[in-house]
Image (spheres, rainbow, N blue to C red):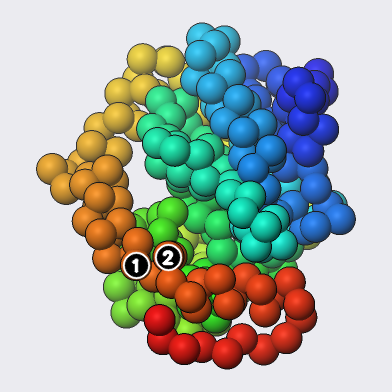
Amino acid sequence: MTDNPIADAPTVRTEEDDGVLVISIDRPKVRNAIDGATARALAEAFDQLDARDDLLVGVLTGTGGIFSAGMDLKAFAKGDTPVILGRGFAGLTRTQLHTPLIAAVEGWALGGGTEMALACDLIVAAQNATFGLTEVTFGLVPPEGGIVRLPERIPRNMALEILLTGDPLPAERAHQLGLVNHLTPPGETLTKAVELAHRIARNAPLSIAAVKRAVNERTAYGDQDAFRQQDQLVAPVLASHDAQEGAHAFAEKRSPHWEGR
C-alpha cells in the first residue's frame, strides 16, 4: 500500500492498495473538520479515483479515531467555506462519482461528516461511532445531503426526528435502521472497509459501473432534482442572521441567541 499526500495539502492523504484508493482526512487536532483547503484536496482525490481505470473502489475515512466533525465552523465564521460550487460539501456531496465509495467511520461523524458518509455508497462504522446532523442547533440546516438522503436510507419518521432535534445517532442504532452496512470493534473500520472494497473490486468493472448507475438513477426524481428543490427552501436559512449567530456562538463558546431572522 503506497501512501501519498495530495499536492500541497497535508490534510488529505491517499493510499493505493490493489485497485482500492483509501482517502484519509488528516486534521485530527480539529476532529477532521473540513475547511476550504481540505475540501479542494478531497475533490482532487475524488477526481483521481474516478479518472483512473485501475482504481475500482474508494474508501473515505478520517485519522485520529474520528471520521469528521463536519464543517470547520471557525473557518466558516471567517468566510471560508468547504462547499465547492457544483460539487457540494468537501467536493463530494453533489458530485456524481462513477466509482463506488465506502465510508469507514470511527468516532464522530457530525453535520457535514454525516453528509459525507451519506454521499458514499456503503458505510462501515465502529460500534462506538456516532452520527449526527446537528445543524438546527446552530441556526443552520443540513443542505448537503442530510435532508435529501437520510429519509431515503432510514424510515421517514426517524429521519425527521434526527433532523429536527439535532440529537446524535449511535452507530448501533444506525445499523438497526439500515444506514450502516457493517459494525466493527473500534479501530477496525478501515480494515473491514478495505476488505469489502476488495470484494467489490474483484468483480467486472463494467458490471460495477452499471449497477451503481442504475441504482443512482432509480427514479426520475433523482438527487440533483431533490437538491434543486431543497435549495429553494434552505437558501434563506443559510443567509439568515441566525446562521451567522450559530457559527459565532460556537467559535465564542457561548449559547446562541436566536432572533428568527
Q: Nearer the viewer, residue 151 or 197?
A: 151
Instruction: Please say if 123 is above or below 6.
Output: below
Q: Position of residue 168 (x, y in %)?
A: 58, 77
Rendering coords of residue 207 (x, y %) = 35, 20
Answer yes or no: is residue 97 visible.
yes
- Tag 1: Cα neighbours inside 10 Å, few (<14), some, or many (≥20)? few
The image shows residue 23 at horizontal and vertical percentages of: 68, 33
| Relative depth, front residue between 38 and 78 | 78
Say what secondary structure mark 2 lies in.
loop
Residue 169's quadrant in the figure?
bottom right
The residue sitting at 50% across, 55% down in the picture is 115
Quadrant into which the C terminus falls = bottom left
Q: Is residue 180 left or right of residue 154?
A: right
Using the rendered view, name the quadrant where residue 90 is placed. Answer: top right
Residue 236, label in figure: 1
Q: Which residue is mark 2?
A: 239
What's the residue type where badge 1 is placed?
Pro
Q: Which three-letter amino acid code belongs to the residue tagged 2?
A: Ala
**How many C-alpha atoms fall within 10 Å of the one at disc 2: few (<14), some, or many (≥20)?**
few
